[in-house]
Amino acid sequence: MSGSKSWEQGGCLCGKVRYAIDRGGIAGQAHCHCRDCQRATGSAFATFCFVPDASFRADQGEAKGFTVQGTSGGSVTRFFCPDCGAQLYSEVAVMPGVRFVKSGSLDDASWMEPQAVFWCDTAQPWVAMPDGLAEHATNPG
């Protein structure tokens, strides 16, 4: 292994906030059906990859954060563009040093292959769970 990084670019809708992630450093990918993700995305669930701090690079602009108390009792901060409001990533107190990068904010997310589904207990009844993925009633662990 050469140690070289494979940077995937991403950013917000208006282009003012840009970032990159090292695809080789991603620790996993998942869908989350918790009510907070539903509200934050305005959709049935959020899809994201777990990116350690060493595999994340802020390239342009500054994301704004909004913090809520998660089900665990710890904080969840969702970061978004302060101009267009596009969701970019989240930081969760129970997983310090990891960003949950929203797949929809990547320039090309076609390579993503989520391995798990979280918060199936609060999934909308009209959403079909993908075959072959590990399903968790709430958070794993």
Image (cartoon, helix red, strand yellow):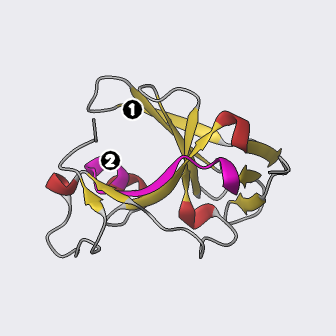
Residue on which the image places disc 2:
36
Percent from the top left, x then y, of residue 15? 77, 62
The spot of residue 105 in percent (x, y) is 62, 62
Q: Amino acid at mark 1?
A: Val
Of the residues shown, which amino acid type is indicated by label 2? Asp
Q: Quadrant of residue 117?
A: bottom left
- Rendering coords of residue 122 (x, y %): 18, 54
Q: Residue furthest front?
A: 1
Give the secondary structure at mark 2. Answer: helix
Is 6 above or below relative to 91? below
Is 24 inside the magenta-drawn segment? yes
Q: Is residue 22 left or right of residue 36?
A: right
Which residue is tagged 1? 68
**Observer-nearest of 110 and 67:** 110
Which residue is drawn at the image coordinates 20% and 61% (left, top)? 123
Name above or below for residue 109 compared with residue 10: below
- Pointers 2 and 1 in contact (CB under 8 A)? yes
Q: Secondary structure at mark 1?
A: strand
Local crowd size for mark 2, using a 10 Å CA cut-off: few (<14), some (14–19), many (≥20)? some
The span shown in magenta is 23-37
